[in-house]
Amino acid sequence: MKYVIGNWKSNQNLTESLIWIDGIHAIKPKFPENLSVILCLPFTNIAGFNHKLADLGIPIITGAQDVSHFAPGKHTGEITADMLGELVNYCIVGHSDRRRDFKETSEMVAEKARLLLEHAITPIICLDLPYLDEQIKELFQRNVDVSRCFFVYEPITAIGTGKPIEASDANHIANQISFLLDNAAPVLYGGSVTGDNVKSFVDQSRIDGVLVGTDSLEPTLFSEIISSLT
Ligand code: PGA
């Protein structure tokens, strides 16, 4: 199975997200059988988005972009894994945006992954070289079952810059990540993926899919990525 995962970050309100679905419905991209398409949305959009996807029979699976590292309790404003369990099957954790702007640590990310798995949500764990070893070690220390997680190699220089790294270099690092995980989990690449370059990444021997930020926001561009993999 290959994976295309969209990450909208802090973009699109509910109304805009429903219009996005109309766009996909009008384009009708062919969803290949061996491709799983996952879209990670702002919390506020997920329930309405799920309803509309189901009504129109569009085979996109939804995910969240973050979760609290606390269990339910007295933490004003936090969205827990327990809350997300009713809404999504996937959740991104440890994106470099969050490490940079919200001071997220490898310990917090590992705790988030642990809580997500308790609620049958697949953690999509983002990695870059400076903290790759530390993050994986932290997961093992907390007995997180890495075989139930997804991992994404996201070099910071490639995120949102329009400058992806070479697919063969991404494959090399994906191979290293895979080795540290005993080949137990899917490893994806993220950073300036487009319809033009997606196939070069997904065709690599150790890359199981892509995480797409900018080009997941436009139905036309996202459809091009899906269609490039048919
Ligand atoms: P980008 O973002 O596709 O805009 O580079 C990727 C990501 O941050 O997940």
Image (spheres, rainbow, N blue to C red):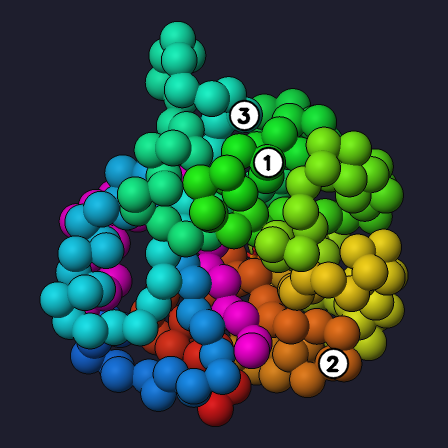
| Front-most of residues 213 and 142 | 142
Mark 2 vs mark 3, CA separation in Å? 34 Å
Mark 1 vs mark 3, CA separation in Å? 9 Å
Image height of 169 relative to 7, above or below = below
Q: Residues within 10 Å of mark 3 (few under 14, many from 20)?
A: many
Q: Quadrant of residue 58?
A: bottom left
Q: Nearer the viewer, mark 2 or mark 3?
A: 3
Q: Residues within 10 Å of mark 2 (few under 14, many from 20)?
A: some
Mark 2 vs mark 1, CA separation in Å? 29 Å
Magenta residues, as a range?
1-22
In this rendering, would 97 be left or right of 37? right
Q: Quadrant of residue 220?
A: bottom left
Residue for badge 2? 204
Of the four image quadrants, the one with ligand 1 is bottom right
Query: Where does the image place residue 62, in percent across and percent down from the top left?
Result: 36, 56
Badge number at residue 69: 3
Q: Residue at x 64, y 72 (%)?
A: 208
